[in-house]
Image (tube, rainbow, N blue to C red):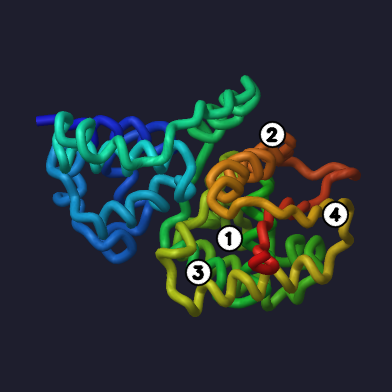
Amino acid sequence: MSTVFSDTLQELRKASGFSTAYRFFHDNGGQAALGFTYRQYMLMESGVLPEAGKLGRLIPALRLIPLTPPANRLVTAWLRTRAGEAVYDQLVAPILPAKTKDAQQAPMHGLVRAMMRERVYYLTHEQFEASLADYPTYICYTAITADTGLWTAASLAEALDLKKGEVEAALKRLASVGIAKKVKQGVYRCPFSDRMIQCPQLNTVSPELLKKVNEYITRLAASAETRLREGFFVRADRHQFMGHFPPLLRFAIEASYGYTVREKSPSTAIFYAEGRIVQVRDF
């Protein structure tokens, strides 16, 4: 029997781009990453309320930011289902902060989110780990997932200023997990390069892989030319700022996907668009 929580969970799951419960569970790394079985997840969508700890796992898996309106919807639905409508309205709702009207999203925001839902590809944990095997492999992964063309080790090595042997090893490694596909002897392409790639949530991967991600991104960025840098020091209420600004920043970064081109031309380049919030001091 469905509940307020199960209905909300299904709605948010679909809005995040996971068309089925099966895809949501497995694209997020399955039981090893989520901490519950597929059967347990299906029970959640069927009306069985999960423990609070499992609720904490669901929020990042749904690509929600804690304390934002969508995440709060799921938590509120959990509380409402746990307490029951009458008890929730009588005892829980009165002690919660007064509701503020959510800022209306611009029409473009809806268009970008809809485009993402149609075009997203979720890397498996195995694929994510393979892409980080070493620095040359990470560069090759970054390149071929952004291009629909055919590549040999020699042509990719020349394009990326890498050694041919490094690229050969990288392409074989990427092909073993389905990131690259061998079209014919020595020729590869990425089978999902026309889609927007989402990596596993970083809180579900090992500290070792997280360290590699940061190291490789920092290393690549350090070797690149900064085209634009904007930043402000803002004094704000921590809860208000982190509850409302991160979705706007995430939208701006995701909107860069709209400029994606999949074929090389004299003016194409790989850009890294970054959104970053740093808490400097308590003051």
- Label located before the other in sequence (4 or 1): 1
Q: Quadrant of the N terminus?
A: top left
SS assignment at label 2: helix
Name the foreground residue: 89 vs 124.
89
Badge 4 is on which residue?
229
Badge 3 is on which residue?
130
Neighbour tally class for label 4: few under 14, some 14-19, many 20 plus, Cα within 10 Å: few
Camera-nearest label, 4 or 2? 4
Compute the Cα span from label 3 to label 1.
21 Å
Compute the Cα span from label 4 to label 3.
31 Å
Neighbour tally class for label 1: few under 14, some 14-19, many 20 plus, Cα within 10 Å: few
Camera-nearest label, 3 or 1? 3
- Residue 231 in sight: yes
Q: Are marks 4 and 1 in contact (CB under 8 Å)?
A: no
Residue at the (33%, 45%) spot, across then down: 24
Q: Amino acid at mark 1?
A: Gln
Badge 2 is on which residue?
258
